[in-house]
Every structure is written in structure tokens, then in C-alpha cells.
């Protein structure tokens, strides 16, 4: 289950500094492994054994002054709805502003846990000043310095203790799929096409505390959950344009699933926002199937599918090993194929290869094409093993792991993909000293 923290507050209080501190170096490593450009809005953090996502709402602020307040207000409302914990940042140097009072007003009325972080408490004198912020009527006040780290340990201890516990312990161990994509791509329509065919096959299980809905699909020999957020169904369309809203919604759905069907609108082609969602899926190391929907509206000749495939794969490069299914939610063309592809990716994601098979296959190839020597130093890979992680990770043990560069890692990844089916799944390569 996803743990989502949203950072809210007015500009310049230090949201982005706090975001960087929380997501820290770990994020840089994750991004480097996934090969994605660093995103300052959304990152992964880890404290006391708890993984969580952090969203900096400040990154979504609009440039237009007129709608500035309105935009921030709606961001706070969305954050309340979609995040598990709200971190409200205020600035001890400027003190309480009208804006802070406005946000506090909204937050006091919400049922989500709120932590008020009084930032820029860089020294002890400022600790006393930070208690003025109790006037905003919120508990859980934490003086911190996002810049030098003071107070952040205590703040994080409390933060991770506030995540809702998963009450659905004996939840069935079935694959969880979700459909993400830009507004109007056809997500609701395809969900209806899946589950609307025969209503009685559907068992909606009330979500856990986080409002997620798992709809069980048990038909034609398939058994899995379609993960939806409550928002996907009931949310007013007015919010749909807000990129922030779509992103929040997508993050929640992605975190709660094993495989994500990324739905692209065939009539619009591949857009930047599709790329962003793709990156979110990658960051979370979930399986991926691309659905090119509204295929019924596309004028086709014999090469249309090929051309589209090439276009999508080029846009996603260097990740090219994932299924693409051309669907129509309206005519139901290939919607079962979308499910089958997702099940296959789920299986690929759970593939465990024995150490002996890995070594028997890969060591001879490595012998033939060893890593290039650097500064006259000879690099020797001794063995490889799959780590017991959720998404496939392979550890190569060698004498000088720091000298193995990305191109050689890609070579190793490609060899693994050639011999085993990891379509739709990230393959992580790590080098270890031995
Ligand atoms: P945001 O607009 O809320 O994301 O704020 P930023 O993170 O961009 O920070 C705004 C300014 O406040 C920057 O100049 C930061 O260096 C500074 N700042 C952030 N955190 C602290 C802090 O803990 N102490 C001090 N003294 N300055 C800080
Ligand atoms: P969502 O915002 O991603 O959930 O998109 P909807 O499911 O609400 O679909 C947006 C619009 O596209 C609706 O008018 C649908 O009827 C239409 N639509 C969705 N899928 C298809 C499709 O495969 N073919 C055609 N022709 N229209 C579609």
C-alpha cells in the first residue's frame, strides 16, 4: 500500500528544501538506476523501515497572479483528499501570514493527519518563536531546519507513525492492476468494459482506510484486482484539468498495484504527460503495459500499428521492452488482450532465476565480452545472483564495481532480457564488491 505525504505551504517557506532532505540521496540513486531525470515534485523517502512518497505541491503552483490563491487552495484540498498525511510548512522568520491562516483553516476541518512544520528554526533562539504558530489551531507542531537538518529526525519519527495501518491483513494475494493515463484517454470506459459485461462477477471490496477500491475480476480463468481510487469514479470533472490532481491520482493508483496499464489516446499520440506518468511507474518499479486506446478512431493501413509502435517505443527509450496493445474501450477490441498482457507482465515481475542458471548463462557471455579495463585495471565479474527484491534486481559481484559504467550495465541487462522474459518490467543491475 502506498504511503503518500503531501507538502503544502506558501512559496519560500522551504517546501522544496524539505522535499530534497526527505528524498535525499536515495532518490538520486533510484533515479540514476531508472535513468529518469530527477523530478522535484515527486520522490521516494525511507525512514525507520517505512517507505513513503513525498509530493511537493509547490512545484505545481501556477504563474498567473489572478488565480494564484485559488490554485493553491485547490491544491490543498486535493492534497487532503489524496494524500495520507499533510505536512504544512510555515516560516518562523516571517511569522504567521494571512495565507497561513487560510490554509490552517482548511486543514483544521480535514480528517487527515496534519503535521505543522515550522521551518528555518536554524538555532535554539528560534525554537521559542516557533510556538507562536500554535495560534493557527493545529497540533503536531515541529520546529525544524530543512537546511541544516535540525529537528527533522523527531519530525520523521512522528510522521511515519501516523501512516494508516493496513487493516486488510488477510487480503488475497492476487495480482493488482491499474489503469493510468491522461484525462479522457478512456480509463473509465475500459474499466466499464472489463467489469460491466457481467455485473455479478464483480465483487467490490470496500477499500482500506486509504479509499482505494479493489474490484475483483474473476472470469475466463483469470483472477485479479483492478485497483481504482475512489476519486476515479466520483470526483467532479472540474478538477480534471489540474495536472497536479491527475498526478496525485495516478501516484496513488500506481503505488497500490503490481502492473500499470498506461493508457494513451491514439487520436492525440504520445504526449509529455504520458511520459511523466511512465516515469512515475518506473520510479515505483511497477510492471507496465501500454494501451493505445480509441484505436477504432484511427484510420489504418497495413503499417499503422508498426508505425505507432515505433513512435511509442522511441518516446520511452531507453525502455523499449514492454507490451503495447491497441484497444478500443467502445468496441471492446483487444480488451482481453490487455488483461492477458498484464498477467504476463505480472508473472515476469515475479520471476526468480536460480543463481546457477544465471551464472551458467551469463558468465560465459561476460568472459567473451568482459568490462573494458580502466586505467590498466582488469575488471573481473565473479558471479551473479538475483536479490530477493520485489522487482527483479541482479547483483554482479566483482573486484572493482565502481569501474563498471552504464553502457556495460546495459549490456548485462540486455543479455538478461534475451534469455528470460522480463518484458514490461524494469531490470535493475547492481554491482557489488567481492
Ligand atoms: P519553497 O518555495 O517553499 O519550495 O521554498 P524553498 O525550499 O525554495 O526555500 C526558499 C528559501 O528559503 C531558499 O532560499 C532556501 O534556501 C531557504 N530555506 C529553506 N529552508 C531553510 C531553513 O531551514 N533555514 C533557512 N535559514 N533557510 C531555509
Ligand atoms: P477517462 O477520463 O480516461 O476516464 O476517459 P473516459 O472513459 O471518460 O472517456 C473519455 C471520452 O472518450 C468519452 O467520451 C468516451 O466515450 C470516449 N472513449 C473512451 N474510449 C474510447 C474508445 O476506445 N473509442 C472511442 N471512439 N471513444 C472512446
Image (tube, rainbow, N blue to C red):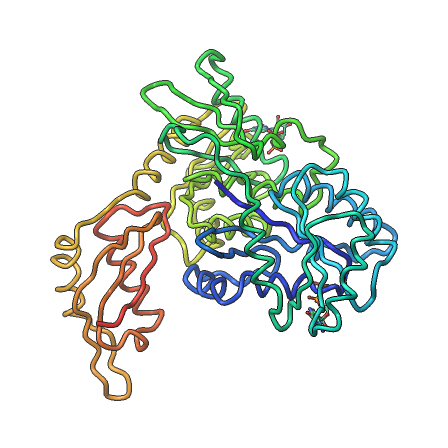
Q: Quadrant of residue 100?
A: bottom right
Q: Nearer the viewer, residue 129 or 243?
A: 129
Task: Judge whether 133 appears above or below 286 on screen.
Answer: below
Which residue is depicted at the point 49% across and 28% down?
214
Task: Judge whether 279 appears above or below 33 on screen.
Answer: above
Image coords of residue 388 (percent x, y): 28, 51
Which residue is depicted at the point 70% across and 57% down?
58
Image coords of residue 335 (percent x, y): 44, 27
Q: Quadrant of residue 155?
A: bottom right
Task: Judge whether 330 appears above or below 45 on screen.
Answer: above
Q: Nearer the viewer, residue 113 or 229?
A: 113
In the rendered view of the protein, which quadrant contains the C terminus? bottom left
Is 102 displayed left or right of 293 in the figure?
right
Image coords of residue 75 (percent x, y): 73, 46
Which residue is depicted at the point 28% across and 83% down?
374
Q: Which corner quadrant of the figure contains ligand 1?
A: bottom right
Q: Quadrant of residue 367?
A: bottom left
Q: How many marks?
A: 0
Which residue is depicted at the point 38% across and 20% down?
218
Q: Nearer the viewer, residue 98 or 198?
A: 98
Q: Nearer the viewer, residue 244 or 16?
A: 16
Image coords of residue 189 (percent x, y): 56, 26
Task: Judge whether 212 appears above or below 181 on screen.
Answer: above
Is 355 displayed left or right of 199 in the figure?
left
Amino acid at each position: 500500500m502506498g504511503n503518500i505525504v503531501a507538502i503544502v505551504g506558501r512559496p519560500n517557506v522551504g517546501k522544496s528544501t524539505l522535499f530534497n532532505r526527505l528524498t535525499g540521496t536515495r532518490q538520486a540513486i533510484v533515479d540514476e538506476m531508472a535513468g529518469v531525470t530527477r523530478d522535484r515534485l515527486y520522490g521516494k523517502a525511507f525512514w525507520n523501515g517505512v517507505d513513503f512518497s513525498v509530493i511537493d505541491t509547490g512545484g505545481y503552483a501556477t504563474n498567473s497572479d489572478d488565480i494564484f490563491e485559488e490554485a493553491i487552495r485547490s491544491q490543498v484540498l486535493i492534497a487532503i483528499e489524496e494524500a495520507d498525511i499533510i505536512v504544512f510548512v510555515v516560516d518562523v522568520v516571517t511569522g504567521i501570514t494571512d495565507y497561513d491562516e487560510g490554509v490552517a483553516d482548511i486543514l483544521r476541518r480535514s480528517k487527515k493527519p496534519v503535521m505543522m512544520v515550522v521551518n528555518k528554526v536554524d538555532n535554539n533562539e528560534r525554537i521559542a518563536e516557533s510556538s507562536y504558530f500554535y495560534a493557527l489551531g493545529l497540533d503536531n507542531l515541529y520546529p525544524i531546519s530543512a537546511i541544516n537538518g535540525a529537528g527533522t529526525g523527531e519530525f520523521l519519527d512522528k510522521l511515519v507513525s501516523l501512516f494508516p495501518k493496513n487493516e486488510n491483513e488477510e487480503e488475497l494475494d492476487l495480482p493488482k492492476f491499474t489503469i493510468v493515463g491522461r484525462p479522457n484517454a478512456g480509463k473509465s470506459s475500459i474499466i466499464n468494459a472489463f467489469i460491466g459485461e457481467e455485473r455479478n462477477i464483480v465483487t467490490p471490496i470496500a477499500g482500506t482506510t486509504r479509499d482505494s477500491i479493489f474490484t475483483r475480476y474473476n472470469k475466463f480463468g483469470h483472477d485479479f484486482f483492478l485497483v481504482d481510487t475512489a476519486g476515479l469514479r466520483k470526483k467532479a470533472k472540474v478538477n480534471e484539468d489540474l495536472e497536479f490532481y491527475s498526478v496525485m491520482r495516478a501516484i496513488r493508483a500506481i503505488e497500490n498495484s503490481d502492473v500499470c496499464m498506461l493508457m494513451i489516446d491514439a487520436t492525440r499520440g504520445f504526449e509529455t504527460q504520458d511520459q511523466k506518468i511512465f516515469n512515475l511507474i518506473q520510479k515505483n518499479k511497477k510492471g507496465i503495459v501500454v494501451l493505445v486506446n480509441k484505436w477504432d478512431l484511427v484510420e489504418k493501413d497495413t503499417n499503422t500499428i508498426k508505425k505507432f509502435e515505433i513512435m511509442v517505443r522511441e518516446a520511452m527509450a531507453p525502455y523499449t521492452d514492454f507490451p503495447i496493445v491497441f484497444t478500443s474501450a467502445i468496441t471492446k477490441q483487444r480488451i482481453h488482450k490487455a488483461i492477458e498482457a498484464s498477467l504476463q507482465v505480472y508473472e515476469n515481475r515475479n520471476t526468480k532465476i536460480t543463481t546457477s542458471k544465471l551464472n551458467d548463462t551469463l558468465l560465459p557471455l561476460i568472459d567473451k565480452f568482459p568490462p573494458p579495463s580502466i586505467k590498466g585495471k582488469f575488471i573481473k565479474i565473479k558471479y551473479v545472483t538475483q536479490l530477493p527484491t520485489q522487482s527483479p534486481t541482479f547483483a554482479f559481484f566483482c573486484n572493482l564495481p565502481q569501474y563498471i559504467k552504464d553502457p556495460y550495465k546495459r549490456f548485462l541487462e540486455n543479455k538478461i532480457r534475451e534469455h528470460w522474459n522480463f518484458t514490461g518490467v524494469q531490470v535493475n543491475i547492481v554491482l557489488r564488491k567481492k
